[in-house]
């Protein structure tokens, strides 16, 4: 476990909030408190049938340790069940300067987005879901923020219960689309392949005859012949393998996306795969031509749910060999079946190639909640004070003294 960050400094005691059915809610926002919450969190993630690896303590603790003062966790408990958590909602804080109102504002998102999690949502005890979500709604409605959004929620029922409760309170609720690549790709559709018990059955029943024959030729000509080979980056070789995957991804996309954007996105993929490696959940096959890597795929493996999540891949655009992606994806599906997994998840985006592997869409949700009326007392959370002070420094450096003065006045009000 990494050394504690400054976020371990003592924070003001946050009172517990009364909740329906005798439940109480407390806020965890320090690394020390997060560590103390670990047993209850792990117990809840094991109980929750809708949990994913991206909501586990092991995953989220990495995101939180790397981002002090940008997160909190709403924890619902029953005083009669000490040591248990009935619901957890990890939150991410964003600080923005409103030019129209000349004030800092706090926006909330799903906490998993601090680590680019593929899926977000709530951890809930299945026997106490409704009451626990009501407790979260009550507390969250009273917290200071102007906008709350969650993207990539794969929990339709919980999501609807949550947003309907806010709508009943008069908040503005909207479910949103999320189209990318010049609106040609729906990023709220996640193509997934149900995996059978053996790879031969998968090829026979879930892949078209044409694709099956093409793969058989590719495998015979490239892999069985020894012309190419596939290795797995693991153990001491993982970092080198990840470097190769990232380099191949940049080769494929840098010209199209631009150097700055490509570097940022590649950094996100690196963070995700490093986090998976830290908890033994990374799978990274590499396709080689002689001693040169020509393709690689990065996956996050959720063994509790039985899912292999494809995160990113790269291939050498100068490689003469065809079918690099096919060889790697079919190999990965074969490996996942051998590991006893039940789903190969292509994650966000309905790109056409994913369906040639027998994938079927699974939709996820993206919603936004806004307060109907502006209340300066509920616009800014003090946990964001550090980010606000950094922004004030920028104002002063750029000679924006009016903004700096108004920002100082706002922080003074918050502190008083």
Image: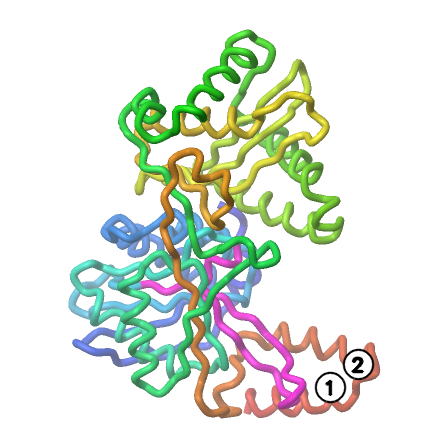
Q: Secondary structure at mark 2?
A: helix
Residue placed most toward the observer, 323 or 50: 323
Q: Quadrant of residue 137?
A: bottom left
- Disc 2 crowd, CA 10 A, few/some/many (<14, 14-19, 20+): some
Q: Pointer 1: what residue?
A: 404
- Disc 1 crowd, CA 10 A, few/some/many (<14, 14-19, 20+): many
The residue at the point 32 percent across, 23 percent down is 204
Above or below 274: residue 103: below
Q: Secondary structure at mark 1?
A: helix
Residue 97 belongs to the span the image colors magenta: yes
Q: Closer to the N terminus: mark 2 or mark 1?
A: 2
Residue 353 got which mark? none
Left or right, 125 with reference to 115 = left
Q: Pointer 2: what residue?
A: 396
Which portion, as a residue range, is magenta?
Answer: 88-115
Discs 2, 1 touching: Cβ within 8 Å: yes
Residue 389 belongs to the span the image colors magenta: no
Residue placed most toward the observer, 162 or 94: 162
Residue placed most toward the observer, 394 or 183: 183
The residue at the point 22 percent across, 65 percent down is 129
The residue at the point 40 percent across, 78 percent down is 173
């Amino acid at each position: 476990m990494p050394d504690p960050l400054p976020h371990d400094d003592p924070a003001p005691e946050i009172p517990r909030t009364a909740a329906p059915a005798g439940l109480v809610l407390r806020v965890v926002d320090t690394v020390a408190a997060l560590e103390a919450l670990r047993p209850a969190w792990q117990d809840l993630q094991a109980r929750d049938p809708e949990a994913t690896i991206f909501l586990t303590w092991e995953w989220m603790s990495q995101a939180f340790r790397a981002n002090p003062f940008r997160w909190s966790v709403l924890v619902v408990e029953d005083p009669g069940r000490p040591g248990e958590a009935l619901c957890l909602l990890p939150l991410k804080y964003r600080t923005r300067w409103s030019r129209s109102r000349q004030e800092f504002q706090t926006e909330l998102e799903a906490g998993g987005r601090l680590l680019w999690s593929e899926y977000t949502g709530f951890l809930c005890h299945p026997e106490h879901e409704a009451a626990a979500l009501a407790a979260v709604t009550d507390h969250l409605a009273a917290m200071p923020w102007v906008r709350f959004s969650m993207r990539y929620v794969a929990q339709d029922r919980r999501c609807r219960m949550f947003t309907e409760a806010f709508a009943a309170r008069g908040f503005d609720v909207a479910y949103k689309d999320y189209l990318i690549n010049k609106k040609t790709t729906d990023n709220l559709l996640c193509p997934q392949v149900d995996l059978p018990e053996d790879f031969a059955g998968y090829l026979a029943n879930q892949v078209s005859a044409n694709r099956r024959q093409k793969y058989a030729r590719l495998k015979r000509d490239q892999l069985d012949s020894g012309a190419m080979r596939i290795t797995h980056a693991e153990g001491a070789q993982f970092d080198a393998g990840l470097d190769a995957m990232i380099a191949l991804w940049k080769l494929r996309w840098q010209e199209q996306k631009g150097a700055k954007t490509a570097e940022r996105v590649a950094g996100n993929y690196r963070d995700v795969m490093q986090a998976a490696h830290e908890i033994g959940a990374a799978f990274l096959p590499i396709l080689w031509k002689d001693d040169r890597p020509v393709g690689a795929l990065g996956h996050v493996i959720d063994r509790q749910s039985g899912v292999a999540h494809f995160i990113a891949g790269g291939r050498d655009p100068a490689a003469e060999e065809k079918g690099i992606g096919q060889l790697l994806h079919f190999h990965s599906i074969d490996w996942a079946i051998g590991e006893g997994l039940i789903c190969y998840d292509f994650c966000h985006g309905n790109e056409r190639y994913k369906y040639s592997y027998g994938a079927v869409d699974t939709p996820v949700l993206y919603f936004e909640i806004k307060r109907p009326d502006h209340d300066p007392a509920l616009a800014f959370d003090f946990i964001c004070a550090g980010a606000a002070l950094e922004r004030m420094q920028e104002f002063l450096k750029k000679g924006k003294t009016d903004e700096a003065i108004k920002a100082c006045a706002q922080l003074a009000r918050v502190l008083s």
